[in-house]
Amino acid sequence: MRKVDFIHKLAELDRKGIYVLAKRDIERLFPNEDAKALEKSLQRLVADRLLLRVAKGIYLNPYASSRNSWAIEEIAKALRPDSFSYVSLESILSEYGVISQIPISRITIMTTGAKGVFETPFGTIEFTHTKRSPEKLISRTIHDKRRPLRIASKKAAVQDLYRVGRNTNMIDEEELEEEFEP
């Protein structure tokens, strides 16, 4: 792959708001590139700082004008492309004010995919597996057009936290009582 061709592809994707790419996406962009040549090209592009490797097989265009404050969620989407994933647990409960602690450089995500923890230049992504069906999860989550991932409703996030059995002592019960009064 020629560097100039790759730069043009990145610019085209940036105009469409795409700045996080999985290796499989790059393979689709250059279908005639053999696996070893593609791997060498990716290594060169990272060394030349035209791409930033943010996780195994996941890259970010560091010069994208479309990049926004939700890069970590875009990376999470790329890490679990075939799963239903949504922001929940401590991350969203902190946003709702249900817990007073603010997770610094960590995002907690429920997923129908595999659990796992990924260290990225944008923070740590923690996936926690859920057995609930995507159909059930749709009704428990909210779509915010500005964000790449859906977010848990306050009630769903609390239920998720109790279900995984951690940090339940951080919940501000008064905040919950206001929300769930009959």
Image (cartoon, grey):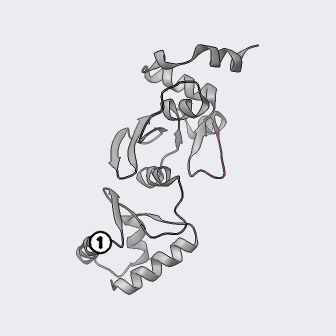
Location of residue 55 with respect to 21 vertically, above or below:
above
Residue 94: which quarter of the image?
Answer: top right
Q: Is residue 94 above or below residue 79?
A: above
Up the image or down, 146 lies above or below 161; here it is: below
Is residue 173 rendered magenta in the image? no
Q: Residue at x 57, y 34 (%)?
A: 95
Left or right, 120 with reference to 71: left
- Closer to the camera in the image, 62 or 119: 62
Q: Quadrant of the N terminus?
A: bottom left
Q: Give how far across and how far down residue 141 sits, in percent.
A: 63, 37
Residue 82: where, in percent of width, then height? 47, 51
Q: Residue at x 67, y 14 (%)?
A: 177
Q: Secondary structure at mark 1?
A: helix
In the displayed structure, does residue 59 sit left or right of residue 160? Answer: left
Q: Which residue is mark 1?
A: 42
Residue 10 position (above or below residue 105): below
Q: Which residues are magenta?
A: 142-146
Q: Residues within 10 Å of mark 1 (few under 14, many from 20)?
A: many
Dominant SS type (magenta): loop
Three-letter amino acid code at disc 1?
A: Leu
Q: Quadrant of the C terminus?
A: top right
Q: What's the residue at 66%, 47% (across, down)?
A: 144
